[in-house]
Image (cartoon, rainbow, N blue to C red):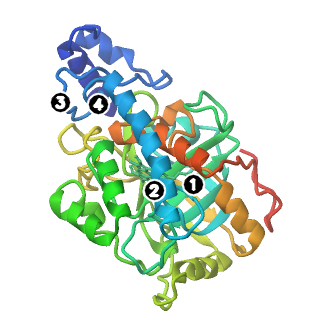
């Protein structure tokens, strides 16, 4: 079904594409997309402003898109410096600068998981995977936890081998999520305008939301302070391959039975960090789901701010992230947490990011990592107070 949706649209797109794009007869293209194939690169759009609904093609043209992404990378490095120096802080991540903490654990795949999810790190014979999970606020500077902001959860699986999208890390697969089902902006062009406005302060950010009621406001309305990072739901925002033939989005929710957490005093600027430390001491658990693309209208790929609703694309339970009781405090843990680098392009081509907003991220995350001299690839639990990491 999903194979059919993605492949059919590829064929239809190729058939209507502009000069220079190979004309493909529909049946041949449908047959051509196989799970183990390398995902196809985005195609030239049939017209410069055309927007694909359910498969990938470049914005403007592929050459123009690459030029814009290189510019975004430069802009992120400039923002990194500007937004921290103006607040008297050291340069940090371009976004998600403030960590609440990093916790180790294991990603266990459900034994009876749906056959459609068994690709990449979810394939038969894979896992359990050792992981490091970083919890964060959204902006690229440190501010009090009760400010309006997105909250992030970034998951790094280790020991992952196979064809990779980027080579700067050797054996990781990462899933980056925030606590809103859609990102700010239908694509990275809009996101970057927001990034500049938001740096100027809350009023500019809110004005941007008001001017973009369909593509930014839904995400920005989810930026109220949360009671706890350990009991939030997080979403991956853009679409991703699951094998070359399928498109999915992913989300994680607290495991069934997770107790609600009583909010700490929100006047404490680090109440989320303190709450996470207490939650980690007791152990945390998140269930991880994928949503399969249903159809071009309700579950588009290029238009990132159209939410894939659960009634259209029901979440399919893949496995659980179990973070055992641990002490996440201390200087060594914090330094380790800071130097990690998460990137949606760190991973197998079987999970390759899709859509304009995700294609831009290949450029800007690496620029941000370089701009803060970050980037350290862990290979296990690194001698923190953990049992030996499971061997995948
Ligand atoms: C599509 C939805 C998106 C989600 C779910 C998301 C999520 C995240 C998360 C969770 C982190 C923190 C990673 C960590 O803990 O180290 C992060 C970092 C970052 N994000 Fe995003 N993000 C999204 C879109 C974007 C876009 C569109 C851009 C820019 C065009 C962007 C730029 C960045 C940068 C520069 C960092 C810091 C990277 C580093 O220095 O390591 N993000 N993002």
| Quadrant location of the C terminus in the rendered image | top right
Q: Mark 1 or 2 closer to N-term?
A: 1
Dot 1: within a 10 Å radius of its alpha carbon, few (fewer than 14), some, or many (20 or more) residues? many
Q: Return the residue at label 4.
A: 55
Q: Mark 3 or 1 closer to N-term?
A: 3
Q: Return the residue at label 2.
A: 177
Residue 218 in percent (x, y) is at 24, 62
Disc 2 to disc 3, C-alpha distance: 29 Å
At x 55%, y 70%, the residue is 88
Q: Mark 3 or 4 closer to N-term?
A: 3
Disc 3 to disc 1, C-alpha distance: 35 Å
Dot 2: within a 10 Å radius of its alpha carbon, few (fewer than 14), some, or many (20 or more) residues? many
| Rendered image: mark on residue 361 | none
Q: Indicate yes or no: mark 2 CB to ligand 1 under 8 Å.
A: yes
Who is closer to the viewer here, 313 or 272?
272
Q: Return the residue at label 3.
A: 49
Label 4 near label 2: C-beta < 8 Å? no
Pair 3/4: label in front = 3
Q: Mark 2 or 3 closer to N-term?
A: 3
| Residue 280 position by quadrant | bottom right
At x 18%, y 57%, the residue is 212
């Amino acid at each position: 079904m999903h194979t059919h949706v993605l492949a059919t649209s590829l064929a239809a797109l190729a058939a209507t594409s502009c000069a220079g794009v190979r004309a493909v007869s529909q049946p041949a293209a449908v047959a051509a997309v196989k799970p183990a194939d390398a995902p196809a690169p985005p195609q030239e759009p049939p017209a410069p402003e055309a927007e694909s609904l359910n498969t990938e093609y470049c914005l403007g043209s592929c050459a123009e898109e690459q030029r814009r992404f290189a510019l975004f990378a430069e802009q992120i490095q400039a923002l990194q410096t500007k937004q921290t120096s103006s607040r008297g802080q050291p340069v940090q991540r371009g976004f998600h600068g403030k960590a609440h903490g990093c916790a180790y654990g294991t990603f266990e795949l459900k034994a009876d998981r749906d056959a459609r999810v068994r690709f990449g790190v979810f394939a038969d014979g894979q896992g359990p995977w050792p992981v490091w999970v970083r919890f964060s606020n959204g902006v690229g500077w440190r501010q009090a936890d009760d400010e309006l902001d997105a909250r992030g959860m970034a998951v790094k699986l280790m020991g992952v081998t196979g064809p990779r999208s980027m080579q700067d890390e050797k054996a990781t697969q990462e899933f980056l999520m925030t606590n809103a089902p859609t990102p700010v902006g239908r694509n990275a062009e809009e996101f970057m305008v927001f990034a500049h406005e938001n740096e100027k302060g809350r009023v500019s950010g809110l004005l941007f939301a008001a001017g973009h009621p369909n593509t930014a406001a839904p995400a920005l309305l989810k930026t109220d302070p949360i009671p706890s990072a350990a009991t939030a739901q997080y979403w991956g925002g853009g679409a991703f391959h699951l094998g070359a033939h399928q498109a999915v989005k992913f989300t994680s929710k607290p495991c069934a039975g997770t107790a609600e957490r009583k909010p700490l005093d929100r006047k404490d600027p680090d109440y989320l960090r303190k709450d996470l430390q207490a939650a980690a001491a007791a152990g945390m658990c998140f269930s991880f789901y994928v949503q399969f693309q249903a159809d071009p209208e309700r579950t588009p790929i290029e238009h990132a701010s159209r939410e894939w609703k659960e009634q259209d694309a029901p979440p399919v339970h893949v496995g659980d992230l179990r973070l055992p009781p641990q002490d996440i405090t201390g200087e060594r843990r914090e330094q380790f947490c800071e130097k990690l680098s998460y990137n949606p392009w760190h991973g197998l081509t079987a999970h390759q990011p899709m859509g304009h907003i995700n294609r831009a991220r290949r450029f800007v995350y690496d620029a941000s990592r370089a701009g803060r001299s970050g980037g350290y690839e862990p290979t296990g639990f690194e001698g923190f107070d953990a049992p030996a990491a499971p061997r995948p």
